[in-house]
Image (cartoon, coloured by chain):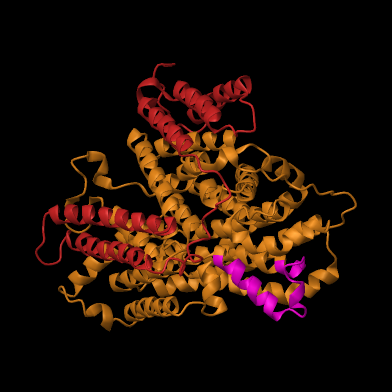
Amino acid sequence: MTTANKKELTIGVAMLGASIAYLVMAYRVPGHDGIDAATVPTLLAILLCLLGALQTLSAIGNRARPAAESDADAPEQTSASVVEPLTVLKTLGLILIYVVLLGPVGFPIMTALYLYLQFIVLTPVNQKVRHLLYAAIAVVTPAVIYLLFREAFDLLLPAGLLNF
Amino acid sequence: MLELLQQGFGAVFSLNIMLLMLGGVAVGIVFGAVPGLSATMAVALCLPLTFTMGPQAGLSLLVALFVGATSGGLISAILLKIPGTPSSIATVFDGGPLMEQGLGVKALGVGIVFSFLGTIFSIIALMFIAPQLAKVALSFGPHEYFAIAVFSLTLIATLSAGSMVKGLFAGTLGIAVSTVGIAPVEAVRRFTFGVSELNGGFSMLTVMIGMFAVAEVIKLAETGRHAVRNKAGSVSMKQIKGFGFSLKEFRQELPNATRSGLIGLAVGILPGIGAGTSNLLSYIVAKKRAKQPETYGKGNIGGVVASETANNAGIGGAMMPLMTLGIPGDTTTAILLGGFLIHGIQPGPLLFVSQGPLVYTIFAALLVASVMMLFMEFYGLRLFIKLLDVPKHILLPIILVLCVVGAFGLSSRLFDVWSILLFGVLGYAFVKAGMPVAPFIIGFILGPMAETNLRRGLMLSDGNFASFFTNPIAATFLGLALAFVLWQLYSAVRPRGGVLGQALRT
């Protein structure tokens, strides 16, 4: 089984999984007599399951003739670039912490911290981390955004600890 | 009509709005030019700025962003040989070689001027066609709306890039996500899990900010640290008269431009496909009709003309279903719809009756923004080229922060910030799975419309489905949708179909 096929199969299984979860939830919606609020979700769930099954089956079916559709799936693959799952995880982690602490700690402080760390995480491998520059941008950006929205656009972002 | 247009211009020609629009066009051009940023993102990020403005100022700004971003893609297409947006893919074919031959300024000049002409042409078409369309649409009832929603969804799901199964799945999933919240008609809570914030469902804007902007930041994390950065080619603006090309060249390209403009407009009107398709389609047609087709792809300005006229002519086209029916034709107009709704304006046929002056203000803003785009993009070129060099690892985290601000600003609650994170991760998963995002968005927007009108239609006909097929307009659209799926299935079974099919699938 080629890796492309394995990927398609994984996608199919994921599609099917999401569809079945939705089907189960749709079934729990009150109603189910005649046409009511549960009708459309149920129809959608059935359609989703069918499409998920179609994707899974076609991935399994393709195993027999691996090279047949290789060029059809190729365009979005940028095989030349290096993929770094670790950076993705770090980024997701940073965004998660940012959102969690946005309320309690406040927008100005959390944004400065988030930006500084995120700049470091995303710095290209062939460039040096420029701490001073990063810190300057990380402090100025939230200050400008916070004050601009507060003064000019009447939007109060969570102030948190910096309560002024 | 003239009187209303005069009023519209009167509103736009105030210092306040003009300044906003100048800024909007400039920011739009930057978002169009930098690969990875898009018109959708530009509108999404600037929406929070418009919350406190009146609808006239707010919508003028959004429209300016739209016009700027659609055209800005040509800068990176010619200078970096990377299309800034999918709508300028075909610009690279001839713009790239022209740049290599040292004719970069000429390519840019041609691109910008014909972008402008394409935009103006389509806006004039919009001004004449939209009010008539709105008159027809006034008589539409639930049956018609349901059928049009289904037709639009089918079109976008089957025409998006990649496999048809994934496109249909994405569209259906979009509708499924839109069913979260209180159901139409009998107000049953669905899929809310007792979370009161979910009663109203997910906000359209959080879904779009998440899927387009947050997902883009996560995507950069994956490959950005190893990406090879292309240096933008430099162009000399010295000794350039006018826009860098001769009147003779201009006249020669007029038939090509007219044809491409019509293609762009027609494709733009169709829901689901827009400038991303029309630029390739008109490039192929221009090449076929050219006297020396072999020079295309080697630096013929005709290629730039075809692509840029067509993608900008899509602006007016895409605004038609949005303004007259409230149906967005693509993701950019989808986010514009969000902008309309924020300002308490429901696009649809009634808009022309109840908000006539505002409609013409939007038309006027579109025209003024095009003129601004023409001059700013050409004479401010060097500034925009500099901005292409802003490192992505600095730019995208700041964009993420702006996304958070925008989401929070919608209704001052952290729930919306969580939503953009959720949809950001979903958007990233879509990219990984090769699943198109556009059908999901359109499904999410049209889902409630389809469901509500289905239920209403059934109530009107006492639960009888047949009434959807006895209504002539509804039956036509449903029939077209069905025919379209069958045609797509047929061409999928028989691979390597016509040029049209191939262009639509790219």
Say which of B162 and A137 sits in front: B162
**Residue A147 visible in the current orientation:** no
List x then y, in percent, for residue B94. 73, 64
List x then y, in percent, for residue B341. 41, 51
List x then y, in percent, for residue A89. 42, 35
List x then y, in percent, for residue A39. 18, 63
Residue at the (46%, 65%) spot, across then down: B160
Q: Residue furthest right?
A: B239
Q: Quadrant of residue B480?
A: bottom left
Most prominent secondary structure in the magenta stretch?
helix
**Any idea which chain is the red one in this picture?**
A
* Vertical comparison of B424 with B255: above or below: above
Residue A102 is covered by the magenta coloring: no
* Vertical comparison of A162 with A27: above or below: above
Q: Is residue B398 left or right of residue B476?
A: right
| Count of marks overlaid on the render | 0
Say which of B464 and A114 sits in front: A114
In the image, which residues are magenta? B277-303
Q: Is residue B62 left or right of residue A31?
A: right
**Any idea which chain is the orange one in this picture?**
B
